[in-house]
Image (tube, helix red, strand yellow):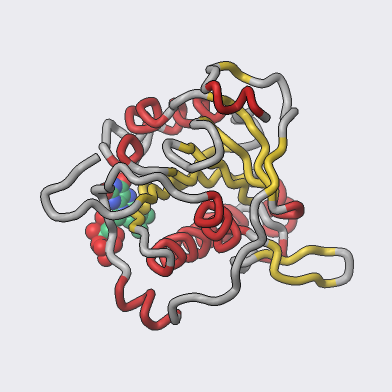
Amino acid sequence: MSFLLLGLSFRLATYEVAIALPEPKLRGMSVEEAIRSRRSIRSYSGDSLSLVQLSQILFAAQGITGKRGDKLLRAAPSAGATYPLEVYVFVGRVRGIASGIYHYVPDTHSLEVLRIGDFTDSLALACLGQSMPREAAISVVLTCVPERTTRIYGERGMRYIYMEAGHVSENICLEAISLGLGAVPVGAFYDEVLNRLIGVDTQKEMAIYVNCIGKPAKRGERK
Ligand SMILES: Cc1cc2nc3c(=O)[nH]c(=O)nc-3n(C[C@H](O)[C@H](O)[C@H](O)COP(=O)(O)O)c2cc1C
């Protein structure tokens, strides 16, 4: 894994490198307190996240929380348990892993390395030049693979997919609060630019939501 730390910027042909995430903790702030405290946070300190914090956020997003027959069930509800969402992480500052773009694998609670390098500027530009992706320690991008849901529910499946993205985003926002972090959901981005940045095949998969997360800046402090 040492080459990750060199910050080399290149696209790995396939998912060749996996990073195991720490086991998520199952105790923290009460849901009521997190709901009461949640606000969209758009300015972050320059602090890095720990791998434990990253793990916790991804678990809240799509972590495995149960089993029905052979089917693994995830942290957020999904119409017919079709799980149309994929989770990508733009890492700006996380201790122990290089800046880059990663793909979360719920079943193994691990990250696949997609691209190494600092892509936070590119993400900010994709988000209409909004500053949060550039400042945030991480940004979580949700994509969807519509066919997983529309093959069962037809056109209505698209509606379900957007609902599901809302569930996941709220889980992320509340988990961020519980960890003493701040988050903002971002729906304003250029679809084509973001899809290209992640490298998805837009015939099958497309970006639908971004969540930027970092330690909130103190008053008057910016990264
Ligand atoms: C679907 C959706 C898209 C959003 N997109 C953006 C965005 O692109 N940029 C931004 O700064 N905030 C965005 N927000 C955050 C809202 O501006 C914010 O939730 C609202 O102002 C209420 O503030 P609060 O979240 O602190 O309660 C979005 C929120 C939602 C639900």
Q: Give percent across and percent down for residue 109.
A: 69, 53
Please identify the residue farthest to the right as the structure is shown: 70
Quarter the N terminus occupies: top right
In the picture shown, does residue 205 fall above or below 29?
Answer: above
Q: Quadrant of residue 206?
A: top right
In the picture shown, does residue 69 fall above or below 172?
Answer: below
Q: Give percent across and percent down for residue 218.
A: 19, 54
Number of marks in picture: 0
Q: Is 46 placed left or right of 2 in the picture?
A: left
Quarter the C terminus occupies: top left
The picture quadrant for ligand 1 comes to bottom left
Query: In the image, what residue occupies the spot 49% across and 65% down?
Result: 171
Q: Give percent across and percent down for residue 123.
A: 40, 31
Looking at this view, is 150 or 69 the one in front?
A: 69
Q: Give percent across and percent down for residue 33.
A: 36, 80
Looking at this view, is 24 or 170 the one in front?
A: 24
